[in-house]
Amino acid sequence: MSEQQHNWSRKSLDELAKYYTNHIHPEFLTDSTHINQPYPTATWLREHGYSGIRYTLREHHDRTFTEFVQKDVGEDCLQIDNGGSESPQRRFNIEHEATEAAVDAYFTRREDRELLAESTLASRRSRFRTWVKTYRRHHGTDAILAHADDIDNKAAERRRARDVLDDIADNLGSDQSRLTFVADVRPVYSWLTDEGYLAFNPLDGVESEYGWERPDADNQSLQATDVQQLLAAADTPAETLLVTALPGWGLRPSEVAQLHVSQFALGGDDPHIAFEERKNGPGTVALHYGVHTVSDRIGQLAAADDWQGYLFPSPTKTDTHVHSDTITNRFKRLADRADVSVDGQLATPRTARRFWYSMYSSAMVDIRAEMDNIADEQGAQSGTVVWEQYLSEADRRRRRRQAMAAKLTDAFGTGNGSLAGQNKNLIN
């Protein structure tokens, strides 16, 4: 059964609990690769066609998946079948129990709250398992917590960490892969330090000792002035929506092609697009700009009696949408007309999506600086602790939306349904 056929959003909390008990949990118990876990991970749910339940719980019932299983399903679905062994296999195969529990807590938190894309989580899990295995082989133990729980141990533990990194680096083929490995392992250590499990992060700044160099990345993006030129060149509601959806919302061409009126929530102070399935699972995309653009496009299309709800309908079939290649070609034609290029090449949807990510990255830098200031004023351990422990998910979402709206203002202005236009305080 596909995600569409489940109709998750139409089920009540009781109906979701009953479905989980009668269908998902029995299937999960038959999967021998997960016999040591009490409930499915986000990866397992996605691979088996159930990822939409996580999105529905979060958006419609204010529940993480873990909270749902613990509070709404019942204890019968929390029992672990470990195949008759006396002790369950550890998720990260860490022999030191306190370290295993702390590392598991890090990943569980990010899985439950979907703080990272699943591809990022999978990479980070794999590389941390490699780190622990190599650490144990070198030092005869994987008691990472015990070795870094006192600042007096810092010099010795940094030497142990470098021994491990030397071994792993020798087996990686490039400086880029070595830097990527450290970038995946260090955040786990950072979280353990912020949460008080460790007294220090033994990997802080360690790559600077190796002289590794990053290759020049071909990741140029549109600039704010480019977006302005594209908007000025757009002659139709469809072209304006195209510019709004690619650099303004950061969507992929395939997602733009398939946009349907049923996905949009345009009212209230949280306008967004809902996706039951994306590349990394279900989720929502906030509309910092373009509410009126969507309304105008819907108004234009609704005049046709045979309109089926797609914002980019196929010109040859009334019941379907254009292909993603059509979106790409239309954007390139508009970029050509607007004389917008990136690094000497005609702008593409990829450079438009990079613009969104560049703005989001800049917004998060501002947020982290704000959290660090709060931490200094309140005596908290770090801005990360303030962000994760003292702000609710609603507060975090609101701050992300505000910061992002401010970043997009240069390109999109404060009109046409932008959050910045609706609330001047967002950009002060």
Image (tube, rainbow, N blue to C red):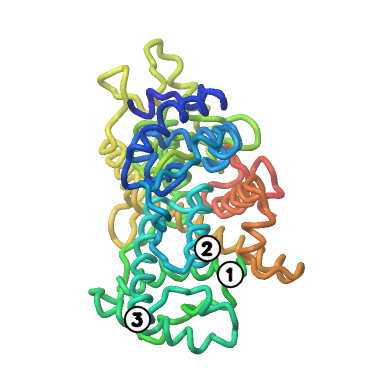
First in sequence: mark 1 vs mark 2: 2
Per the rendering, the mark at residue 197 is: 1
Q: Which mark is residue 102?
A: 2
Mark sitting earlier along the chain (3/1): 3
Counting residues from the start of the chain, the first of labels 2 and 3 encountered is 2
Residue at figure coordinates x 41%, y 58% from the top left:
90
In the picture, the disc for residue 9 is: none
User: Residue 300 at x, y = what percent?
Assistant: 46, 22
Give the SS element for disc 1.
loop
Q: CA distance from mark 3 to mark 1?
A: 22 Å
Which mark is on residue 138?
A: 3
Quadrant of the rendered image containing residue 321: top left
Q: Which amino acid type is marked by label 1? A: Tyr
Q: Is residue 248 above or below residue 75?
A: below
| Mark 2 surroundings: few (<14), some (14-19) or many (≥20) residues within 10 A | some
Query: Amino acid type of disc 2?
Result: Ala
Count of marks, rendered view = 3
Q: Quadrant of the C terminus?
A: bottom right
Q: Of residues 45 and 237, which is closer to you in this image?
A: 45
Q: Residue at x 39, y 32 (%)?
A: 26
Q: Amino acid at mark 3?
A: His
Asked which quadrant contains residue 301, the reply is top left
Identify the residue at horizontal 37%, vertical 55% (top origin): 122
Q: Secondary structure at mark 3?
A: helix
Residue 356 located left or right of residue 179 = right
Is residue 391 left or right of 75 when viewed as pictured? right
Mark 2 and mark 1 in contact (Cβ < 8 Å)?
Answer: yes
Q: Point out residue 43 in the picture as x, y percentages from the top left corner.
A: 38, 45
Mark 2 to mark 3: distance in Å? 21 Å
2 and 3 marks in contact (CB < 8 Å):
no
Disc 3 crowd, CA 10 A, few/some/many (<14, 14-19, 20+): some
